[in-house]
Image (spheres, rainbow, N blue to C red):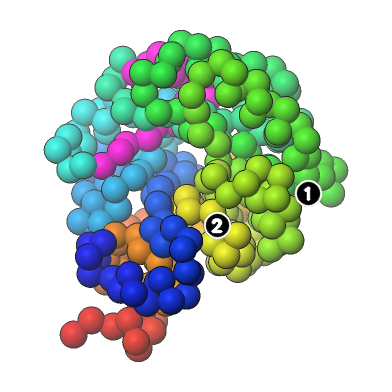
């Protein structure tokens, strides 16, 4: 659905003067596939092409990580090289450290996601170092990039990590201040293991304002209600994964991401624009689910609600 195909009048009546456009970063080709058996480069590129046809203009498509630890993310340079260069899409790639950032830029990456965890225990499990050391690595990456391309710092476990590591918004705020002093970057708060509820989302907006991204998982099936709480609070950037794919191989109990089609369906009901065609997105959801040998777990089971169906 192009921006001029949705009703700005309808959106304005509900949201008043609020921004009625939502940026979706599709993370299925990276986060969604990282826990799956490896797919060929051709299949991964075909997945991205289908998502582009659905209207997604921002995607995380690869990760420059050790193929020994995450075999499904091998061949990242080949994936980048095969993607449509003239599609008007921002391709993010995930990097865990400075070496990964250097490799990604050498391969022609146009934007980076850099990970750091607010949980000490998850940080050690995920990247092999504590959260303060990992945060210092973010500063090294920002210094190296020096504003030459967009960098988004994704804070894993921003809403806690099980019973042992509660939310630590103060640590996040302190680190965000350090990163901002080094170089330009945006920030995304990730609910890696599905700890958050609407009050936690509202608390984060109260602490940081609404100008951050939100990355939600469905461990407790709260992804969509948390997305709604974020939208009401003014957040306009969300990460999602087609077919609800994903999860972390290093976080016990982490379920898949909030499904892109579920969020787009909600946005369509609310009169918020995203530029995404739900019908074509559902086709992509079915295709990748079939390729991975699984049944879709999101809207692909029943299709859009009656008022949103196309002739």
Q: Is residue 181 left or right of residue 195?
A: left
Q: Residue at x 21, y 37 (%)?
A: 83
Q: Quadrant of residue 9?
A: bottom left
Residue 75 in the image: x percent, y percent?
32, 28
Q: Is residue 168 above or below residue 195?
A: above
Front-most of 83 and 267?
267
Residue 208 in the image: x percent, y percent?
66, 43
Segment colored magenta: 89-105
Q: Quadrant of the C terminus?
A: bottom left
Provide the residue designation for mark 1: 162
Front-most of 42 and 86?
86
Q: Residue at x 27, y 22 (%)?
A: 108
Q: Residue at x 74, y 61 (%)?
A: 199
In reply to whether residue 262 is colored magenta, the answer given is no
Residue 67 visible to the viewer: no
Q: Is residue 18 above or below residue 88?
A: below
Label 1, secondary structure: give it. loop
Q: Is residue 310 left or right of residue 241?
A: left
Q: Is residue 112 above or below residue 182?
A: below
Q: Quadrant of the N terminus?
A: bottom left
Query: Which mark is in front, 2 or 1?
Result: 2
Residue 303 in the image: x percent, y percent?
35, 79
Label 2, secondary structure: give it. loop
Front-most of 138 and 21?
21
Provide the residue designation for mark 2: 234
Find the residue positioned furthest to the right.
Answer: 164
């Amino acid at each position: 659905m192009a921006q001029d195909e949705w009703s700005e009048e309808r959106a304005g009546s509900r949201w008043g003067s609020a921004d009625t456009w939502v940026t979706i970063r599709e993370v299925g080709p990276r986060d969604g596939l990282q826990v799956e058996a490896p797919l060929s480069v051709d299949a991964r590129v075909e997945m991205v092409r289908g998502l582009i046809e659905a209207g997604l203009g921002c995607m995380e498509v690869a990760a420059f990580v050790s193929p020994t630890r995450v075999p499904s993310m091998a061949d990242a340079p080949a994936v980048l090289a095969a993607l449509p260069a003239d599609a008007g899409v921002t391709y993010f790639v995930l990097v865990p450290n400075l070496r990964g950032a250097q490799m990604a830029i050498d391969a022609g990456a146009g934007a980076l996601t850099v990970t750091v965890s607010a949980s000490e225990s998850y940080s050690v499990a995920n990247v092999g170092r504590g959260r303060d050391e990992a945060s210092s690595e973010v500063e090294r990456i920002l210094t190296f990039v020096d504003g030459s391309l967009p960098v988004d710092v994704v804070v894993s476990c921003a809403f806690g990590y099980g019973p042992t590591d509660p939310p630590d918004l103060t640590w996040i705020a302190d680190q965000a201040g350090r990163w901002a002093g080094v170089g330009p970057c945006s920030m995304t708060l990730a609910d890696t293991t599905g700890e958050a509820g609407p009050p936690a989302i509202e608390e984060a907006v109260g602490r940081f304002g609404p100008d951050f991204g939100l990355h939600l998982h469905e461990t407790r099936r709260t992804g969509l209600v948390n997305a709604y709480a974020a939208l009401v609070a003014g957040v306009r950037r969300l990460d999602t994964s087609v077919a609800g794919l994903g999860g972390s191989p290093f976080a016990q109990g982490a379920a898949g991401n909030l499904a892109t089609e579920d969020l787009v369906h909600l946005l369509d009901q609310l009169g918020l624009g995203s530029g995404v065609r739900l019908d074509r997105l559902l086709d992509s959801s079915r295709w990748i689910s079939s390729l991975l040998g699984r049944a879709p777990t999101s809207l692909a089971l029943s299709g859009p609600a009656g008022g949103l169906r196309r002739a």
